[in-house]
Image (cartoon, rainbow, N blue to C red):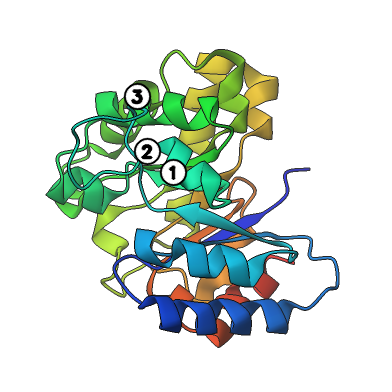
Amino acid sequence: MRRKIVAGNWKMNKTPAEAKVLAAEIANALGAAPCPVEVVVCPPYIDLPAVTETLAGTQIGVGAQNMHNEPKGAFTGEIAASMLQEIGVKYVILGHSERRTYFADTDATVNAKTKAALAAGFTPIVCVGETLEERESGKTETVVTTQIRGSLADLGADIAKVVVAYEPVWAIGTGKTATPAQAQEVHALIRKTLAEMAGEETAQSIRIQYGGSMKPENAAELMAQPDIDGGLIGGAALKADSFLAIVKAGC
């Protein structure tokens, strides 16, 4: 049985003071009772020290929204794995559609980052997904399988440590959501592709999140699908009550 994982991607929101408040609200609401859902928050870089300090000793993990694949060097504006390790980060989102669209991330760069993240002991959350134009022109299968094969190439046994997030680009921040059947169809396709890459047993162990406008109203139905193992949450993760409602939907 795969443990569900719900991760909040705060994107470019919350100052350090605001982030500390939100993290504390989430931690206090979850309490000390064991939670069957793995819970992660991914604030902006500048918020990470405050959030890791606030969540120390809780069951909530902290992730970064990106990282560079090189250990150090002349990469202005970038962050290395060792910097994230030192402040207690355990997860990192890689290949988000906004990174692919606005910052030229490719399957090759995502693959390099994924290898670096695994070497650093992080759990990479690797994102894939098609645009509306690609879906309407019947290219969903080609786009998604190409991204999976490229982004997760040559990982060996470490592929089992990756979390995949299926994010239909047309459903991110738009209020549109893939129906449970649409989402399940692509999740099943991803698992089939993973089986071809790494074997059926490994593919069945890898968790695949849905990441397109999941909210309290649709979270339970989406996560009830056989191949949907949680959510990568955007806007709904910026308020403790809506984020926690999604977490509880996975219980």
Determine whether label 3 and label 1 are within 8 Å by CB: no
Judge from the rendering whether residue 63 lies leftward or rightward of residue 213; answer left or right. Answer: right
Front residue of 79/95: it is 79
61 in relation to 99, above or below: below
| Image mark for residue 80 | 2
Determine whether label 1 and label 2 are within 8 Å by CB: yes
Judge from the rendering whether residue 38 lies leftward or rightward of residue 66; answer left or right. Answer: right
CA gap, disc 1 and disc 2: 5 Å
Q: Which residue is mark 1?
A: 83
Q: Which residue is mark 3?
A: 112
Crowding at dot 1, Cα within 10 Å, few <14 / some 14-19 / many 20+, comes out as: few
Front residue of 197/90: it is 90
Q: Nearer the viewer, mark 3 or mark 1?
A: 1
Q: Where residue 251 sits in the image (x, y, percent)?
A: 75, 67
Q: Amino acid at mark 2?
A: Ala
Look at the image and tell me whether residue 187 can be seen: no
